[in-house]
Image (tube, helix red, strand yellow):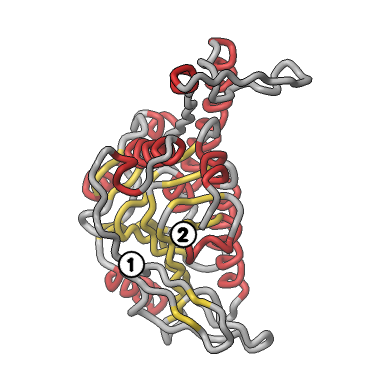
Amino acid sequence: MIPLHRVASLFYNRPLLITPQRAQMISAFLVGRIEGRSGAAAFGEQPIEEVQAFASTQNRDGSVSFHSPRASRFVGEYSKDEVSGKPRPYRMTGDGIAIITMIGELVNRGAWMDSMSGMISYEGFTAQLQMAENDSRVKAVVMDMESPGGEAIGAMEASAQVRKTASVKPVIAFGNGMAASAMYALASGATARVGIPSSEWGSIGVVLMHLDMSGALQQAGLRPTFIFAGARKVDGNPYEALPKDVQSRLQTMVNKFYGSFVSTVAQGTGLSEDAIRATEAELFTADDAKSLGLIDEIGTLDDVLGMIRSARAA
């Protein structure tokens, strides 16, 4: 289990490329845990029975393997590296199409969290992409995506890796659900973007949330005192209301990340920065996303595989 303080430190007072709905849900969960509630109670609901849909597996050596949902688990096979003997971290079809499945929120570091927590790390993703790029058996890559986004830090660098790999061999960003915010930043660097008819795309914006717990502390009879050096050391702390000058500095940081996000999308998709800003971080269904030029085609995973094969045969 990931420590609560670690999750909170990744969420509050940090620029995020994530849909507002998912941000609100995560915040409600964290506030509920901070206040001593958990599970459904954190959302003001009655507790319900929890079901583990993908049970862990006890291995012969005593270790435990955790399993997360994978949209492409029925397409392609895992194979072992000839040199190391270790399984490659992506499935591959018989004709050389590697499928990198990406389900969950995006974080910068912590590849070890991927299968256990439903998170995707940029470092883990870029490592898979680099391996596929250098794998002579891989003729094309499919990014099988379903994510509301995640951390801003690391997203642009990961998108640059997508563009680099796409300059070597075709990379198709396939939205098998939601491909929003930080996930769209990654998708923008691909050779092409394809989504199922019910997929959602966009949310090209940045959000930063400050949690003011001063009222709750006052009710509890608590008053923290900071002893610090450096005038800005405790800026944005959750134990007091956010001062206007601190809010202004945080807004400046958000604006910088937004500019970088817009520039990254423009570089990958060929859309103008004005057109990207005009979306106002809205989330679009596949048909509207195609009309706006955010995606290139609408289709299924089979359609994507067929497109790659047809292009190779041409």
Q: Report the label total.
A: 2
Left-right relation of 142 to 89: left
Q: Is residue 271 visible?
A: no
Say the numbered circle drawn on residue 94.
none
**In the rendered image, which quarter is residue 306 located in?**
bottom left
Tell me where residue 36 appears, x and y as whole percent. 42, 39
Q: Is residue 97 left or right of residue 63?
A: left
Q: Amino acid at mark 1?
A: Gln
Does residue 57 sit above or below 49 in this rendering? below
Q: What residue do we see at 51% from left, 15% from top?
A: 241
Going from N to C along the chain, the mark reached first, 1 or 2, is 1
Q: Secondary structure at mark 2?
A: helix
Please tell me whether residue 176 is drawn above or below residue 307 in the rendered image. Answer: above
**Residue 35 in view here:** yes
Quadrant, the C terminus: bottom left
Name the residue carrying label 2.
117
Residue furthest out toward the top: 244
Spatial CA span between label 1 and label 2: 13 Å
Where is 294 relative to 69, above or below?
A: above
Q: x%, y% of residue 275? A: 38, 32
**Quadrant in which residue 231 is drawn:** top right
Label 1 residue SS: loop
Viewer-closest of 300 and 36: 36
Q: Nearer the viewer, mark 1 or mark 2?
A: 1
Q: Residue at x 46, y 37 (%)?
A: 34
Question: Badge 2 local density, few (<14 within 10 Å), some, or many (20+)?
Answer: some
Question: In which image quadrant can residue 104 be found?
Answer: bottom left
Q: Residues within 10 Å of mark 1 (few under 14, many from 20)?
A: few
Who is closer to the viewer here, 303 or 81?
Answer: 81
The label shown at residue 52 is 1
